[in-house]
Image (cartoon, helix red, strand yellow):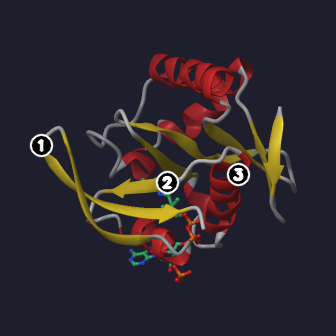
Amino acid sequence: MQVGHTERLWIRTWEAADRDEFCGIAGDPEVMRYIQDGRPWSVARVEKWILRQQRNFEELGYSLFKLVNRGDGSIAGMCGIQPYGEQETEIGWWLRPDAWGRGLATEAAREVLRFGLYERGLAEIVAIADPRNLASIQVMKKLGMTGGGIAVEDGRELVKYRIART
Ligand SMILES: CC(C)(COP(=O)(O)OP(=O)(O)OC[C@H]1O[C@@H](n2cnc3c(N)ncnc32)[C@H](O)[C@@H]1OP(=O)(O)O)[C@@H](O)C(=O)NCCC(=O)NCCS
């Protein structure tokens, strides 16, 4: 299902058939370097993750979404929102490396923030990153998110940015 679009991307919900193509992204060590334990994901883990996104969309009306290149129909990556702990909602983004450095994450995230804050009525969205992940932190700043917070996950200290509905 299509939930939005930008100049260069379609923003869609996931299908089981996306598994293998998305494994090319979640299974890439360069993409996963700063994600959780830094290890590339297995096919089984990707399959479970897709099921969780489908369930989140059904139950909450949002999820981490598939980003599809409008040019050739390939999957560029993901960007969307999901619950973070009991109270918060976080935005996340991963792109395949040949798509990096062209402003695509910022383009997708702007639309996802608009969707979350104004279509779904969330009061605030946070973003979390490994402090070494300067590209991701730069995306947060370009989106107008403000930092200063810290999140701790599995003993790792992460930076936390936020943006509120105005
Ligand atoms: C983070 C990620 C989504 C960014 O995607 P992208 O489409 O390249 O992002 P954008 O082009 O919109 O913006 C990236 C910004 O970071 C900057 N940047 C990139 N690498 C950088 C680095 N090593 N140090 C400092 N800034 C950097 C770019 O110059 C750009 O800023 P600018 O427009 O002010 O010049 C992409 O690198 C990715 O998929 N990484 C792997 C997955 C990941 O770590 N996701 C985030 C988890 S918190």
Identify the image quadrant of residue 137: bottom left
Identify the image quadrant of residue 52: top right
The residue carrying mark 3 is 115
Amino acid on which disc 2 is placed: Ile
Identify the disc placed on residue 155. 1
Query: Observer-nearest residue: 95 or 166?
Result: 166
Q: Is residue 62 above or below residue 116?
A: above
x%, y% of residue 21? 66, 33
The residue mark sitting in front, 3 or 1, is 3
Amino acid on which disc 1 is placed: Gly
- N-terminal of the two: label 2 or label 3? 3
Q: Is residue 134 above or below residue 88?
A: below
Look at 58% across and 62% down and name the residue there: 165
Q: Residues within 10 Å of mark 3 (few under 14, many from 20)?
A: some
The residue positioned farthest toward the left in the image shown: 155
Q: Secondary structure at mark 3?
A: helix
- The CA distance from mark 2 to mark 1 is 23 Å
Identify the disc placed on residue 125. 2
Position of 20 with respect to 2 (left or right) is left
Amino acid on which disc 3 is placed: Phe
x%, y% of residue 136? 44, 64
Q: Name the image quarter holding the C terminus.
A: bottom right
Identify the image quadrant of residue 142: bottom right
- N-terminal of the two: label 3 or label 1? 3
